[in-house]
Amino acid sequence: MKKILEFLQEQNGQFSSARLLAFLITISIVVDYMHAVFTIGGWHPDLNLILILLVVVTGKTIQKFGEVKSNENAN
């Protein structure tokens, strides 16, 4: 549990809601995949599901680079 809490914290020690959102969506997709494989024998992901994952992960990546740039400009 401690490792998960460390993963959800930014470098300044504050918790990141963007990381939590990305983590929860990723876990949800993995659970959906496992459920489909064990119940119907295959997984055919919906385009909307893939787009949601890509948007969240891309948004978090852009946010992280934006934070790094603003921290460099503040120093």
Image (cartoon, rainbow, N blue to C red):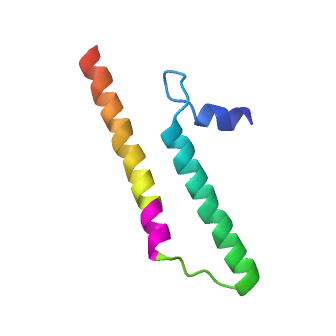
Q: Which residue ends up furthest to the top in the rendered image?
A: 75
- What's the magenta bit mostly, secondary-structure-wise? helix
Q: Residue at x 33, y 37 (%)?
A: 65
The segment highlighted magenta reads: 47-52
Quarter of the image with the N terminus is: top right
Front-lying residue, 17 or 68: 17
Q: Residue at x 35, y 30 (%)?
A: 67
Question: Where on the picture, by quarter, is residue 15?
Answer: top right
Whether 38 is drawn above or below 65: the answer is below
Q: How many marks?
A: 0
Residue 28 location (% of width, % of height): 62, 60
User: Is residue 43 left or right of 19 when viewed as pictured?
Assistant: right
- Residue 64 horizontal/vertical position (percent): 38, 37
In which quadrant will I find the C terminus?
top left
- Give how far across and how far down residue 3 sits, in percent: 68, 35
* Farthest residue, direction left: 73
Q: Residue at x 56, y 43 (%)?
A: 20
Q: Does residue 50 belong to the magenta stretch?
A: yes
At a point 28% along the width and 21% down the height, the residue shown is 72
Which quarter of the picture shows residue 73? top left
- Classify residue 25 by image quadrant: bottom right
> Residue 19 lies in magenta, yes or no?
no
